[in-house]
Amino acid sequence: MKGSRFKWQLARFHEAAEISDLLNLAYRGVDNWTEETQLLSGKRSTQSLVERSMNETGTYFFVCRNDAVLLACARLTLVGNEAYIGSFAVLPKYQRNGIGSYLLSEIEQIVMKEYGVTFFSVPVLSEQHTLKAFYEKCGYQKNGQAEPYPAHLNIGTPKRSDIMIEFYLKKASLY
């Protein structure tokens, strides 16, 4: 996919609703593969949550478009030399064909070059086995840290009390 027409760019504030719609579709929609609908109820995102994130110091939303369609998004929070990747989503009709792996690699390269990041961290629900396998395939490893699901963030209500957030790390490497 090198030389592809997919291009990441910093999201603009007026794109917050579209980003929120993509997150809800990719994680809680009918055709999603992340297993979240079995674990959580409610919305994954709202326009106001995306806007709030866009205003946080050290947090950046990136979007990737294919022509006029919002194909993917990613939220990056920079802390020192580490980038926390969240809200990474690909439009469901583009999933399951390698585009997500490609786009994750591309955003990692941008962040390493632009911000000097040397580590990446992604949070994954403890029961999202398919999503954990995706990140492992992309070079992330479980770091042994886990914490209770953050219900206070209003990004869904757990359907079970034992759902945890696990963290996966990847050392950055320019290639």
Image (cartoon, rainbow, N blue to C red):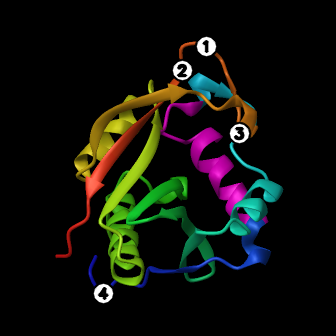
Q: Is residue 87 above or below residue 34?
A: below
Q: Which residue is mark 2?
A: 163
Q: Earlier in the sequence, mark 2 or mark 4?
A: 4
- The mark closer to the camera, 4 or 1, is 1
| Relative to 32, 50 lies left or right | right
Q: Earlier in the sequence, mark 4 or mark 1?
A: 4
The mark found on residue 160 in the picture is: 1
Is there CB contact under 8 Å for labels 2 and 4?
no
Q: Earlier in the sequence, mark 3 or mark 4?
A: 4
| Relative to 47, 136 lies left or right | left
Q: Is residue 137 above or below residue 53?
A: above
Q: Residue furthest right?
A: 48
How many C-alpha atoms fall within 10 Å of the one at disc 4: few (<14), some, or many (≥20)?
Answer: few
The boundaries of the magenta stretch are: 17-36
Residue 175: give x, y in percent of width and height. Answer: 16, 76
Q: Earlier in the sequence, mark 1 or mark 3?
A: 3
Residue flagged by tag 3: what amino acid is it?
Ile
Residue flagged by tag 2: what amino acid is it?
Ile
Residue flagged by tag 1: what amino acid is it?
Arg
Q: Earlier in the sequence, mark 2 or mark 3?
A: 3
Label 1 and label 2: CA atoms lie apart by: 6 Å
Residue 85: give x, y in percent of width and height. Answer: 47, 56
As for residue 34 lying within the magenta part, the answer is yes
